[in-house]
C-alpha cells in the first residue's frame, strides 16, 4: 500500500475541511421555503415564499388570491422560478405545494344585510310593506372579505326568494366593482320585523315608566298582535297593572295611566258653571287616573257624585254633567 507523503496528506485534509466548512455555510445560508404564507398586495413574490430570497425578493411568481379564498402554488413551479433567479435551496421538507392566503378585511354584516334586504324588497314589495326586512344569513358570509385597499362594498347580482318560507339564495359580488369583485353564494332567510318598545328593567304596579326605562327590540312581525304596544306614547307616564319583565312585549291592558287619586284619599272638587264657581271636598270611593271619571262621597252632604280627575287628588264636575247643588253642600 502506497502512502502519501505527509505534506500531501495534510493538504488533502485541509481541502476536505474547507469543503465541509463551505457546505455547512451554504446550508446555513440556504433559503427556506415556507409551507404557508399570507400576503397583503395583489401579487405573490419570491420574497413572500422564502424566508430569505435576497436580491430575488421582488420577483413576481403569481397573482395573489382574493381575501378569504386561499390558493396553492406547486413547489415545482416555485423551484423553477427560484433557480432561474439564483436562489439555491433544497426541498428538505418534501413540500409539494405552498398555501397562499391574502390578508383582508371582513365585510361588515350590516353591509351585507342592507344590500340583501333592498334586493328582497324590490323582489317582494308585499314583504317590505309589513315591516323592516330582517336578514339571517345561514351560509357563505364567512368568505365575504375585501383587500385592505378596497372599498367594503357588496352588489347583489342575483337573488331567489321564496315568499312562503322566507328563504333566499343569492349571488353577490365583493367588492361591488366588477373589475376586482369576486362572486359568492349566500343563503338564508328573510322576514318582516317591527321595532317594539320594551322595558330594560323589571317594573311593578305603582312605578311610573319613563323614557329611560325603555329600549327597542326588533321582533318578527308575526309575533306582534294588534294589542301589542308599538309606540312610547302609550308607555311613558303609565304604570304597570302587573309586574313586567325586561324585554317582554307589552300589551295595552298591561299598563294604565298613573293613579292620581287613590281610593280613600280626600279629593278637592270644583264645579264651574257660568258665573258660579263652587268648591267641595270628598272621599274617593275608587282609584282614578287623569281624565277618568270616579265616584266621590261628599263629606258634608254624604251624597255620592261622579267627578273627572284633573290632578293629584283634584277633580271637577263637568258643566255638561247634571248635578244637584245640594250634593255639594
Image (tube, grey):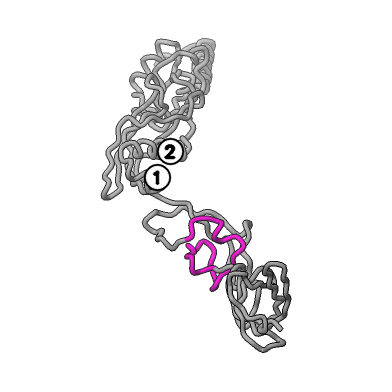
2 vs 1, front mark: 1
Point out the stretch of residues depicted in magenta.
229-255
Q: Quadrant of the image for the N terminus?
A: top left
Instruction: Indicate whether 128 appears above or below 322.
Output: above
Instruction: Indicate whether 126 appears above or below 270.
Output: above
Nearest the camera: 19 or 237? 237
Q: How many discs appear? A: 2
Does residue 60 appear to the left or right of 309 in the view shown?
Answer: left
Compare marks 2 and 1 and give the one earlier in the sequence.
2
- In space, the residues marked 2 and 1 are separated at their CA atoms by 9 Å
Tell me if I can see residue 203 in this picture: no
Q: Residue at x 39, y 45 (%)?
A: 133
Marks 2 & 1, CB-CB < 8 Å contact: no
View extreme (front): residue: 275
Residue tagged by mark 2?
A: 114
Whole-percent x and y of residue 109? 45, 40
Does residue 251 appear to the left or right of 201 in the view shown?
Answer: left
Amino acid at each position: 500500500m502506497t502512502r502519501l507523503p505527509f505534506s500531501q496528506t495534510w493538504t488533502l485534509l485541509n481541502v476536505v475541511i474547507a469543503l465541509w466548512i463551505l457546505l455547512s455555510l451554504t446550508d446555513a445560508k440556504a433559503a427556506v421555503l415556507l409551507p404557508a404564507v399570507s400576503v397583503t398586495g395583489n401579487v405573490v413574490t419570491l420574497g413572500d415564499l422564502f424566508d430569505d430570497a435576497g436580491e430575488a425578493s421582488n420577483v413576481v411568481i403569481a397573482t395573489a388570491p382574493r381575501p378569504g379564498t386561499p390558493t396553492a402554488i406547486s413547489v415545482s413551479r416555485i423551484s423553477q422560478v427560484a433557480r432561474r433567479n439564483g436562489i439555491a435551496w433544497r426541498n428538505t421538507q418534501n413540500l409539494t405545494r405552498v398555501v397562499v392566503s391574502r390578508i383582508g378585511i371582513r365585510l361588515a354584516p350590516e353591509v351585507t344585510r342592507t344590500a340583501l334586504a333592498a334586493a328582497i324588497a324590490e323582489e317582494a314589495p308585499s314583504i317590505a310593506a309589513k315591516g323592516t326586512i330582517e336578514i339571517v344569513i345561514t351560509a357563505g358570509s364567512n368568505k365575504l372579505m375585501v383587500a385592505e385597499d378596497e372599498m367594503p362594498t357588496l352588489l347583489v347580482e342575483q337573488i331567489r326568494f321564496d315568499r312562503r318560507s322566507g328563504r333566499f339564495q343569492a349571488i353577490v359580488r365583493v367588492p361591488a366593482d366588477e373589475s376586482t369583485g369576486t362572486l359568492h353564494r349566500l343563503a338564508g332567510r328573510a322576514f318582516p320585523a317591527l321595532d317594539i318598545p320594551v322595558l330594560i328593567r323589571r317594573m311593578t304596579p305603582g312605578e311610573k315608566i319613563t323614557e329611560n326605562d325603555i329600549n327597542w327590540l326588533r321582533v318578527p312581525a308575526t309575533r306582534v298582535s294588534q294589542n301589542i304596544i308599538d309606540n312610547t306614547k302609550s308607555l311613558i307616564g303609565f304604570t304597570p297593572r302587573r309586574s313586567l319583565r325586561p324585554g317582554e312585549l307589552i300589551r295595552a291592558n298591561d299598563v294604565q295611566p298613573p293613579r292620581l287619586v287613590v281610593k280613600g284619599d280626600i279629593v278637592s272638587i270644583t264645579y264651574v258653571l257660568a258665573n258660579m264657581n263652587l268648591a267641595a271636598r270628598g272621599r274617593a270611593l275608587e282609584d282614578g287616573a287623569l281624565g277618568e271619571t270616579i265616584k266621590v262621597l261628599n263629606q258634608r252632604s254624604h251624597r255620592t257624585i261622579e267627578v273627572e280627575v284633573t290632578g293629584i287628588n283634584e277633580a271637577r264636575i263637568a258643566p255638561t254633567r247634571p248635578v244637584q247643588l245640594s250634593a255639594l253642600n
